[in-house]
Image (spheres, grey):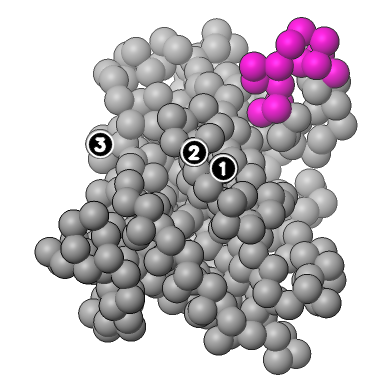
Amino acid sequence: MTILARPAQARTGELAIVEPDAATWDAFVDAHPQGSLLQRSAWGQLKADAGWGARCLAILAADGRILAGALLLTRRQYGLAVAYAPRGPLFADDPAANDLLLAGLTRLARRQRAIFFRLEPNLTEDHPAAERTHTWLLLQDMRPERSIQPRSSIHVPIDRRAEAIFAAFSKGHRADIRRAERDGVQVRVGAESDLPTFYAIMQSTGARGGFGIHRADYYRAAWQLFQPRSRLLLAEIDGRTVAAHMVFADAHSGRYLYSGADEAGLKAGANHLLAWHAIQWAASLGCVSYDLWGIPDALGQAVGADEAARAALERAAQDDPLVGVYRFKKGFGGRVVRYLPAYDRVLIPAFYGLARRRIR
């Protein structure tokens, strides 16, 4: 662990800014209530392989405990950079630790010649700490911005028996899962040798849907780096793969990140069956929720809105490219959540507008 500075006093003594080793950092992320897959060191390594720099900063108490910290990703171009903490930072209850962390991130971003750095707290708007965190960030001259990760999602509670989880699915989803099983869709856990098959499914899905996908080596690295908390699930009909999911789990939640299916898989309900298997896997690891990862943000805004506003937002969501995905995800019995926005600290104002558009 590298100590960078000891410039502050906390309620309980001196604080230091450190760069922890991967094992120490990951243990902190796993123990933190807002710890996320996207703040683990493996996510930094995955993004480093894709051209980002990755550094962890942590605030260390006098007794050796990490109180707060962030994985900060940096992307350089033309001698300048942008910096970003995906689903982070992980804040402390101690204001002095949070002040020191923000100051440390600012210094690190300036050294990287970052035009701005973006924070994306892993807090939903209904979390007890959300309003306090939002207000504090505004007072620190952080400006709210559009988030990079999906702002609205569906979280399925899975800290209960499998029968109760399944019973909470919609009638249609339960029927589709049973039909897929009855019609001979087989699900198996994939190995490294199955990654080319997974990628072929992703390619065909992207071409059909008109969206881009990562390179094959990105998915391979993601699966490898997060083992044993990554899982490749393949759905087959008569021995032919018709759908595939690559899912992940951190200490708190399963994460539905990458999936695809061909026409036969869609007709057979293979994605419904794969999702059910993925949810059971995450539950077996002790996760309390399964994050379905992205729906139209208008539907997140509609939660808690008055009747007229909710109706208008639901109409607006029908034009969102994710509305079809939402119809699939809403049947798994979860609740719609909306995260706090992202927050930018502008360091080089002259270039901020251009950099902001590019990072979107």
Report the residue marked by disc 1. Answer: 135
Q: Is residue 116 above or below residue 239?
A: below
**x%, y% of residue 43?**
45, 65
Contact flag, marks 2 and 1 (Cβ < 8 Å) = yes
For the C terminus, give its image quadrant. bottom right
Labelled disc at residue 132: 2
Q: Is residue 208 left or right of residue 242?
A: right
Q: CA distance from mark 1 to mark 3?
A: 33 Å
Q: Is residue 102 above or below residue 33?
A: below
SS for callout 1: helix
Residue at left offset 55%, top offset 12%: 170
User: How many other residues sit within 10 Å of disc 2, few (<14), some (14-19) or many (≥20)?
Assistant: few
Q: Is residue 192 above or below residue 171?
A: below
Labelled disc at residue 286: 3
Point out the frontmost of discs 1 and 3: 1
Residue at left offset 80%, top offset 16%: 309
Residue at left offset 48%, top offset 70%: 103
User: How many other residues sit within 10 Å of disc 1, few (<14), some (14-19) or many (≥20)?
Assistant: few
Picture quadrant where residue 277 is located:
top left
**x%, y% of residue 359?**
73, 65
Q: CA distance from mark 3 to mark 2?
A: 29 Å
Name the outermost residue toward the bottom.
79
Magenta segment:
299-312
